[in-house]
Amino acid sequence: MRRPVPTRLAALALIVTGAAADAAPAIHLNQIGFLPDGPKRAVVTDPATTPLPWVVLDAGGGVVATGETVVTGDDAASGDHLHQVGFDRVTAPGTYRLRVGGTTSRPFAVAADLYAPLASAALNYFYQTRAGIAIEARHAGGKQWARAAGHPNEIVPCFSGADTKGNVWPGCNYTRNVTGGWYDAGDQGKYVVNGGISLWTLLNLYELNAARPPFADGTAKLPEAGNDINDLLDEARWEMDFLLAMQAPDGARAQVPVGPQPAGQKLTMTAIDASGMAHHKVADRNWTGIPTIPAEDREDRLLYPPTTAATLNLAATAAQGARVWKTIDPAYSTRCLEAAKRAYAAALRNPRVYAPETFTGSGSYGDTALGDEFYWATAELFATTGDAQILAALKRLPPFADPVSEPGWGGVAALGTITLATVPTALAPAEQAKQRALIVAAADRYVAEAAQTGYRLPYASLKYDWGSNSAILNRAMILGLAARFTSKPAYRTAEIDAMDYVLGRNPIDQSYVSGFGWKPLRNPHHRFWAHEKDPRLPGPPPGVVSGGPNSGASADGLGARLKGCAPQRCWRDSIDAYELNEVTINWNAPLLWIAADLAMAR
């Protein structure tokens, strides 16, 4: 298996510079390097108020480019006084260093295949987080990441009894076999609302490139490799099967809270027909400790009550799956579409069933603003069926004409817009052009924001939330789509700017991706990749992205101690920093999308 370029560069860096791996140079750049035809930017921290001379050196020490820095001054997001360097004219493949004043950077590559190893590793993350199957060393990259199957034969009942607020839940008269799917994050819960956006992103990557999709059969490390199915679809189906299994059977009844409920008080329960709804999650009754190997989890596993949000996530992804698998596996496509229609009807029948924050042992993923989920599901169903009545309903929903924002698990309207803008048969050309224009307008805003920031990041806010890297990567996806629609270089440049930040062009010189760069993520908040807590357990495999800086961390003890930090510095590489250093499927999905997009030849 080919070793990623970053690993080779990290070793070379220590030879050339003699610097310790945790040193903090004044030169901040993408630690894996640059594409030959792409932008090449570095950011320099220096108090000088006048330009500084710079040179780019090749592997033999020869000068290949020179210039002066552009002084951009004080930057509130980082707390730094900054200069910028641009050396786009360095296009020949090779290994280089950047010298600014008396400081020389670590080596970096210029290579056409720069992002292919990252794309492969980001996809392999999903295999390594599979539930219900043994993770094998030959697919995982080494015996340290092999583990026994977690939660095999997972046939589980509904939660019953009292929750943390004293609400009594009656349970249900059925069980579901929910074996499989992806563990959501550092815990071992499986959530439909987080699985939905993650699955959509993988399927969109395939559908958008259907003429030449990435990860042809046998190119990824998967047990299904060689089955004549694209490997990206093999991985996506592992989650699609799980989401389908989370659908309540016909005749299901449930006692649930309907509509907003007073915080911290007893819930008012209502009996509903839950037929076709999706259970919100399957998870442990109580939080497991760190570390806990999935196969050694001894907590009760339970289905938690159905919600409208989960039901709409199922409707949307199953409708999308019906399109994707239509010619590949017609029977499976039919099954997906039937599930999507049942879920959509169930959501229309029960439009305000929200997830209560009254359970322990797993995240709540509560959401009481579901207009975006209804729009997304309606868009996917229309794109799949072409139904005139669904189109009429779609056009009545505000997101059909509203400005687009980057998607997240609690804000999925952009997913519907992307589908309408990209599925060839979805809309008439003039209407599809309007959907594309909404995406391009969002990309214009992000390009403008990049120009306002010291680190050239398409994110100008000083508010960095939990999972800020996910917001940045999802913005990069919007930028990548705008680049496809228009062929304007500014959008691809800003897409790369976002990846540059995640891979090290930031004030703490941190590659937020494990295994890539000279200072990669090492200690995510995770119950198995927990080497920091137990030396017998591994650290993360390559290709796992941290949630990144969180300027609002308060419950996290480590994060709380960083109060007053400059937003981009509010981060620590610690397993205990769950609000700063968690890893999740819906953060790795856009990393995969962007890495694969940048790896594809234009």
Image (tube, helix red, strand yellow):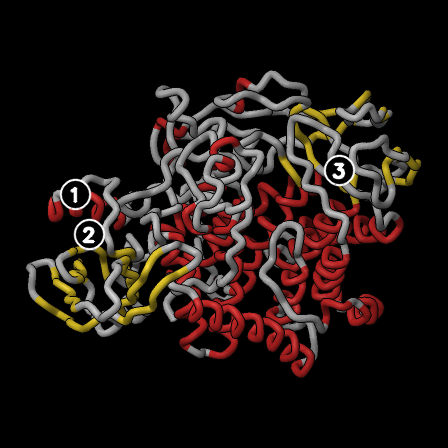
Q: CA distance from mark 2 to mark 3?
A: 50 Å
Task: Return the residue nearer the eye: 588 or 268.
Answer: 268
Residue 469 visible from this viewpoint: yes
Percent from the top left, x then y, of residue 289?
54, 20
Task: Return the residue nearer the eye: 469 or 230.
Answer: 469
Q: Is residue 421 left or right of residue 351?
A: left
Percent from the top left, x then y, of residue 259?
86, 45
- Disc with the residue nearer the chain's start (1 vs 3): 1
User: Which residue corresponds to mark 3?
Assistant: 279
Percent from the top left, x then y, of residue 170?
86, 25
Residue 48, compared with residue 469, is above or below; it is below
Mark seen at residue 19? 1
Q: CA distance from mark 2 to mark 1?
A: 9 Å
Q: Is residue 184 left or right of residue 17?
A: right
- Disc with the residue nearer the chain's start (2 vs 3): 2
Q: Is residue 345 left or right of residue 334?
A: right
Contact, CB < 8 Å: mark 2 with mark 1? yes
Quadrant in which the C terminus appears: bottom left
Residue 496 visible from this viewpoint: no
Callout 1: SS: loop
